[in-house]
């Protein structure tokens, strides 16, 4: 889809949400609809940023990652957006660059898990409750 088509779809969806919020009437529903609109606007903002910094193949891969593990995809998106905002990205991210970033994140997670790993060593030939029964 072209950027103009996506923008038109977003505007139509936002208008639809605003219309639904208007029908909700006064009361407790209004606060939740405002919250929903805020979430929707944030999601659209993130989507727009990601479409600007990712090549189509990389965006497709990130979408497939989201289907499997949403938390990992969100983490990668946050890192990419932060890199774009700080000027660390000079060009669109390719699928290979995304793979490298995924590998680095996976390595970080492995190191963190190793730091928090608990190892239990059991002594061989130590005291055992069953040993008392054998002496009888």
Image (cartoon, rainbow, N blue to C red):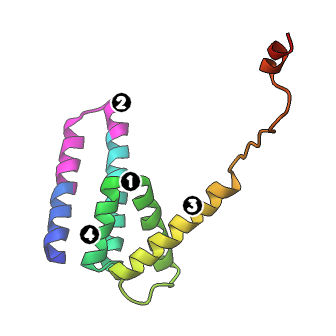
129 displayed left or right of 14: right
Judging by the rendered image, the residue that carries numbered circle 2 is 28
Residue 52 sits in quarter = bottom left
Question: Range of the magenta residues?
Answer: 14-32
Q: Residue 61: image x %, image y %?
A: 30, 69
Q: Residue 28: image x %, image y %?
A: 36, 30
Q: Please state, as top left, top right, bottom left or bottom right, where the N terminus lies in the image.
A: bottom left
Circle 4/circle 1 CB separation < 8 Å: no
Asked whether residue 25 is drawn in magenta, I would say yes
Q: Residue 82: image x %, image y %?
A: 50, 72
Asked whether residue 96 is drawn in magenta, I would say no
Q: Residue 116: image x %, image y %?
A: 69, 51
Judging by the rendered image, the residue that carries numbered circle 1 is 70
**Separation of disc 4 and disc 1 at Cα?**
14 Å
The mark that comes first in sequence, 4 or 2, is 2
The mark that comes first in sequence, 3 or 1, is 1
């Amino acid at each position: 889809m072209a950027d103009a088509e996506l923008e038109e779809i977003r505007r139509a969806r936002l208008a639809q949400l605003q219309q639904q919020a208007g029908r909700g009437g006064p009361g407790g529903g209004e606060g939740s609809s405002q919250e929903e609109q805020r979430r929707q606007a944030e999601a659209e903002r993130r989507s727009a940023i990601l479409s600007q910094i990712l090549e189509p193949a990389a965006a497709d891969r990130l979408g497939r990652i989201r289907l499997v593990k949403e938390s990992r995809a969100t983490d990668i998106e946050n890192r990419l957006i932060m890199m774009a905002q700080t000027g660390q990205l000079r060009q669109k991210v390719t699928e290979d660059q995304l793979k490298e970033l995924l590998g680095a994140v996976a390595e970080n997670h492995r190191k963190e898990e190793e730091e928090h790993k608990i190892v239990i060593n059991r002594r061989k030939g130590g005291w055992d409750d069953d040993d008392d029964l054998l002496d009888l």
